[in-house]
Amino acid sequence: MRTEDDAAGEILYVATSASELVRIRAGGADSVVLDTTPLTSTPSDMAVCDATLTAVIAQPVPDGVDIIGPLLIFADGFESGDTSSWSSTVQ
């Protein structure tokens, strides 16, 4: 889980057991899922690098990681579906 602030609330990143990285605008009753990014397997842990806006998500099976970036943070000018986003799988 990772959070960033934006003008309308916090942006929350969650690696789920449904094999997705979910981006949520957390604003109490007005919270909304902004988008999801599929992962290659069920995650066991997640780390975020603030300098590169990259998430590294570990998966015990198949002993690999997903690397996703840049994280789409509204406060930094990125929008959902920005074509500069990328993902990679390392095994």
Image: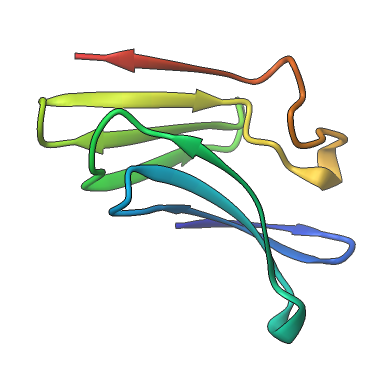
Q: At x 33% / y 43%, what residue is drawn?
A: 19
Q: At x 10% / y 32%, what residue is drawn?
A: 61
List x then y, in percent, for residue 14: 46, 55
Q: Quadrant of residue 51?
A: top right
Q: At x 86% / y 66%, what residue is drawn?
A: 8
List x then y, in percent, for residue 53: 61, 31
List x then y, in percent, for residue 16: 36, 54
Q: How many labels does the image show?
A: 0
Looking at the figure, which quarter contains the N terminus?
bottom left
Side of 80 where 56 appears, left or right:
left
Side of 33 where 19 appears, left or right:
left
Give the vertical position of 57 relative to 46 (above or below).
above
Looking at the figure, which quarter contains the C terminus?
top left
Give the vertical position of 89 relative to 18 (above or below).
above
Side of 85 where 64 appears, left or right:
left
List x then y, in percent, for residue 33: 64, 59
Q: At x 11% / y 36%, what residue is drawn?
A: 60
Give the vertical position of 30 relative to 63 (above or below).
below
- Nearer the observer, 18 or 71: 18
Q: Quadrant of residue 42?
A: top left
Colouring mode (rainbow / by chain / secondary structure / one colour): rainbow
